[in-house]
């Protein structure tokens, strides 16, 4: 135990030394520090309060594309008259307003644990079983940036020092153009996103995102309501079947009516060592002319542009039995026919908030099936796989989409419970069948068919005005994976300081 504590203390010391250098760099780049820009995925409390205000009609902005722009959130909150809110809505408003006005620019954290978490969800921030992290963020009216340095204990990919979470962007009118290593969550799911989740580490790249989701002014397009558009182009790792392949993606989300949000997402693996990376293949990729036998695409796949995923997701809120509910889902196509996604994998869920004068909470029930053509007879060993990009839709072997990887079915009952004095509890109960056909293909969590039940419980509480403690544990009835990637029951903790 002593050696364990000393090793993490050493990691923290090394992190702080490097962070001081990065602090000088970013301080020289930006002036008038205010706060980091936007809400990053992983903050389940913020997401709950956002959704609560949206479903009660207090705000009307897209909320299924993370990160969420700080400008969009600030404008939405500024449109609210606090005196008109009921007690429960005012608590949500007050929580979010404190995030917008948060002057913290420096964060230091230590995250020890006995094992990595199991099936990662929206609230997961434990990709490894121990790390120390330091970050600094600054923002002004023209630009914003953050530098984050982590030192990781026994990383799966061998990368002990990481810059995950670092980014810089400049404001161009109503757009942010920048680069970095940005975590993203696309879709309405709480347990799973089938196309872009927090399961894998963020890869480095460039991005473009709209600041404010104001509707179109053109009469016909104005009916789409508030809309958000984001796009990115990232560089994947060298240690894969097609080294240094690119990951590109775009998402358009909009709210034609306040109770309905629709998202259209598309990602693709393109180029890489030994593959064409010219403008012609990029254009073919963008227009969907990317299957063997299509116009100009050789039968031997020598100029096949890439491996694409695309689809639609939705979230619809309604009232039943005098209670608010929301029905949500996601369909992601692993192939294309007639210009539309086909051979889908899917996810559906239902959620409802519970609020009293003592607590704010939310419960959801969510099912996902990552078998291609899951609504039909199913095609195994194909989702997240590709004949050219044989490392699959993964980054350093970890799925970029659903944490369960392909050919898996999960049913999750989970929720968030916000208590007084800034305390909260996140919980998950999941029944999962991983790699249901048992064929050892790309799914590293299930080298054979594995049926497991998992339980996850996390408690967070502030220690002081500037510090926060997190304690969590997860149980698995059957371990997942094998060798260095094995996932077993364990505990994790963290302590963070923000200034």
Image: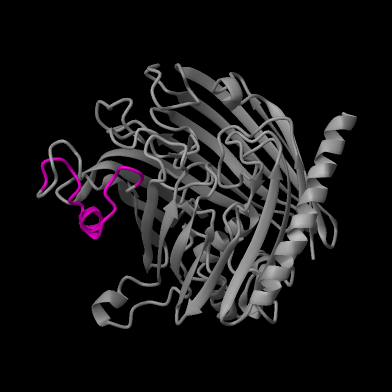
Inspect this view and state whether residue 469 appears. no
Whole-percent x, y for residue 271 in the image: 32, 48
Q: On the picture, is 268 further left or further right than 87?
A: left
Inspect this view and state whether residue 468 appears. yes
Residue that appears at 52% across and 35% down: 412
Extreme front residue here?
274
Question: Which region shows up in magenta?
Answer: 272-294
Q: Nearer the viewer, residue 225 or 334?
A: 334
Q: How is the image coloured?
A: one colour
Extreme right residue here?
2
**Relative vertical location of residue 333 with respect to residue 54 in this rendering, above or below:** above
Residue 16: image quadrant is bottom right
Point out the image quarter for the N terminus.
top right
Whole-percent x, y for residue 248 in the image: 37, 54
Q: Nearer the viewer, residue 460 or 26?
A: 26
Residue 467: image quadrant is bottom right
Whole-percent x, y for residue 393 in the image: 40, 39
**Relative vertical location of residue 23 with respect to residue 84 in this rendering, above or below:** above
Whole-percent x, y for residue 42 in the image: 60, 51
């Amino acid at each position: 135990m002593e050696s364990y504590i000393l090793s993490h203390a050493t990691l923290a010391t090394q992190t702080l030394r490097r962070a001081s250098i990065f602090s000088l760099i970013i301080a020289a780049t930006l002036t008038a520090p205010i706060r980091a820009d936007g809400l990053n995925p992983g903050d389940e409390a913020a997401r709950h309060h956002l959704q609560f205000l949206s479903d009660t009609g207090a705000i009307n902005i897209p909320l299924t594309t993370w990160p969420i722009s700080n400008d969009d959130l600030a404008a939405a909150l500024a449109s609210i008259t606090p005196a008109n809110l009921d007690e429960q809505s005012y608590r949500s408003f007050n929580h979010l307003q404190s995030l917008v006005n948060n002057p913290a620019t420096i964060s230091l954290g230590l995250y020890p644990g006995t094992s990595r978490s199991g099936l990662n969800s929206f609230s997961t921030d434990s990709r490894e079983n121990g790390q120390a992290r330091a970050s600094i963020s600054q923002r002004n009216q023209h630009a914003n940036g953050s530098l984050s340095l982590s030192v990781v204990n026994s990383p799966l990919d061998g990368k002990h020092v990481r810059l995950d979470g670092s980014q810089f962007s400049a404001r161009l009118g109503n757009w942010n153009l920048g680069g970095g290593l940005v975590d993203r969550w696309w879709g309405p799911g709480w347990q799973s996103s089938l196309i872009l989740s927090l399961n894998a580490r963020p890869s480095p790249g460039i991005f473009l995102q709209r600041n404010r989701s104001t509707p179109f002014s053109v009469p016909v397009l104005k009916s789409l309501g508030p809309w958000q558009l984001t796009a990115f182009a990232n560089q994947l790792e060298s240690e894969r079947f097609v080294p240094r392949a690119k990951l590109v993606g775009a998402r358009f989300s909009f709210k034609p009516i306040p109770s309905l949000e629709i998202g259209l997402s598309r990602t693709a693996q393109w180029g890489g060592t030994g593959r064409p990376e010219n403008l012609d293949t990029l254009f073919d990729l963008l227009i969907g002319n990317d299957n063997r036998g299509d116009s100009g695409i050789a039968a031997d796949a020598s100029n096949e542009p890439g491996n694409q995923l695309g689809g639609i997701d939705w979230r619809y809120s309604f009232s039943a039995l005098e209670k608010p509910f929301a029905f949500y889902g996601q369909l992601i196509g692993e192939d294309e026919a007639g210009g539309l996604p086909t051979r889908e994998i899917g996810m559906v869920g239902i959620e409802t908030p519970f609020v009293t004068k003592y607590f704010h909470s939310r419960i959801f029930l969510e099912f996902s099936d990552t078998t291609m053509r899951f609504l039909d007879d199913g095609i195994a060993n194909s989702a997240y796989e590709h004949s050219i990009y044989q490392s699959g839709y993964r980054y350093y072997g970890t799925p970029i989409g659903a944490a369960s990887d392909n050919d898996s079915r999960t049913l999750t009952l989970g929720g968030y419970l916000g208590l007084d004095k800034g305390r909260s509890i996140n919980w998950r109960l999941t029944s999962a069948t991983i790699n249901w056909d048992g064929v050892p293909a790309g799914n590293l969590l299930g080298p054979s068919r594995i049926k497991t039940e998992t339980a996850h419980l996390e408690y967070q509480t502030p220690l002081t005005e500037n510090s926060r403690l997190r304690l969590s544990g997860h149980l698995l009835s059957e371990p997942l994976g094998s060798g260095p990637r094995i996932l077993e029951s364990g505990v994790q903790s963290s302590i963070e300081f923000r200034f």
